[in-house]
Amino acid sequence: MKRRLFALLFAATPLFCQAAVLDAPLACNVSAHQFVSGLIDQNLIQPHAMRVESNSINAFWPTRDADVTAFGFRVFAIVGYEKDDPIFRTGTGEPVGKSAYGAVVIGSDSKVQAAVTAAGSPAIVRHVGPLMTAIFCPRS
């Protein structure tokens, strides 16, 4: 009986999880508003930033049931900022620019850089912590 219940729950898991691959938007061809609002509309990230850096970069958590990846790496957080956009809060310092966005993924910088390069994305890859790497698209 327990095996049947487990099998039923395992089979139903895709019905409850939302999956998204962010490779295309991380080709740096959209604005931060388009990137973040699209993820909010799909219920893939929380609608309000969990943190705002001094340079106005807003960090958003994925929703509980979201399975979001970028270049084959699991997304830990979504980051972004666009000037004069109500989705984003302004930090205490100088903003990073008019529009910037990206994803923080779980993976080493070298492996993430190799995947981003192989995909032909112009995104910038930066180390942010142990096995945490940012994939970032600055847009002026």
Image (spheres, rainbow, N blue to C red):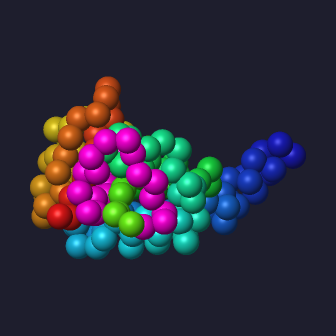
Residue 139 horizontal side relative to residue 13, left or right = left
Q: How many marks?
A: 0
The quarter of the displayed image where residue 109 is located? top left
Residue 72 visible here: no
Q: Residue at x 35, y 63 (%)?
A: 82
Residue 131 horizontal side relative to residue 46, left or right = left
The C terminus appears in which quarter of the rendering? bottom left
Residue 93 horizontal side relative to residue 44, left or right = left
- In depth, the one of 15 and 103 nearer the eye is 103
- In depth, the one of 5 and 122 nearer the eye is 122
Residue 37 rendering spot, x and y as whole percentages: 47, 69
Q: Residue at x 41, y 51 (%)?
A: 90
Residue 110 rendering spot, x and y as whole percentages: 16, 38
Whether residue 92 is situated above or below residue 23 in the rendered picture: above
Residue 99 among those drawn in magenta: yes
Q: Residue at x 42, y 67 (%)?
A: 85
Q: Residue at x 12, y 55 (%)?
A: 117
Extreme right residue here?
A: 1
- In depth, the one of 12 and 62 nearer the eye is 62
Residue 21 rendering spot, x and y as whole percentages: 39, 63
Residue 65 visible here: yes
Magenta part of the chain: 85-104
Residue 7 horizontal side relative to residue 121, left or right = right
